[in-house]
Amino acid sequence: MPSLAQMKNIRMMSILSDEMLNRILPLITEESYDAEQEIFCEGDPADAVYVLVKGKALLNKSASNSVCVAVSAVDPGDAFGWSAILGRCIYSATATCVEQSLLWRLPGKAFLDLLNEDSVMGHKIMEFLAQTLNERLEKRTTQLFKTLLEHIEMVCGLEGVG
């Protein structure tokens, strides 16, 4: 079982009081994964939020039946699998470990129940999540426009359009 000090090293949990962390602690189970092992797959029932404690993982999204694109790297201290507490029934991406990794698993329903019981904790976590999702959206929008511009330049033979 993790310690409070370890929990405070997790970005999502660093914003919470010791009392709040003590309420989350019993929900956490530690899980080990090997390199290339899937944590969950796109379309699987979203039943847990995960925290990467040690190692590295990628979130991949299917672009077609034969093409999969890495949409985000998961580093130690990052939480992922948010679908489990956002009212989504399924995961929107596949999470795969790149190297041997240690994760904490928080059951989605129990974690969401706790966030609903403690409105201050719930507000802090949802505010953190909104900020995180906004940062991801801005990053992906920038990547999309950069890719589109490069494609336009390549197709039209233009340089320095942007």
Image: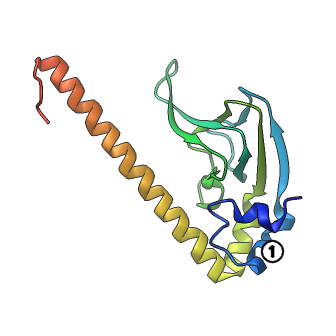
Q: Is residue 31 left or right of residue 64?
A: right
Residue at 38 percent across and 43 percent down: it is 140
Q: Is residue 19 left or right of residue 59?
A: right
Which of 44 and 98 lies nearest the eye of the viewer?
Answer: 98
Give the crowd class for mark 1: few <14, some 14-19, many >=20 residues within 10 Å. Answer: few
The amino acid on which the numbered mark 1 sits, given as a three-letter code, is: Arg
Find numbered disc 1 in the image and state the secondary structure of the residue it sits on.
helix
Q: Quadrant of the image for the C terminus?
A: top left
The residue identified by callout 1 is 23
Residue at 74 percent across and 29 percent down: it is 37
* 55 shown above or below 132: above
Whether residue 155 is visible here, answered yes or no, is yes
The coloring applied to the image is rainbow
* 141 shown above or below 87: above
Q: Residue furthest right?
A: 1
Whether residue 42 is visible here, answered yes or no, is no
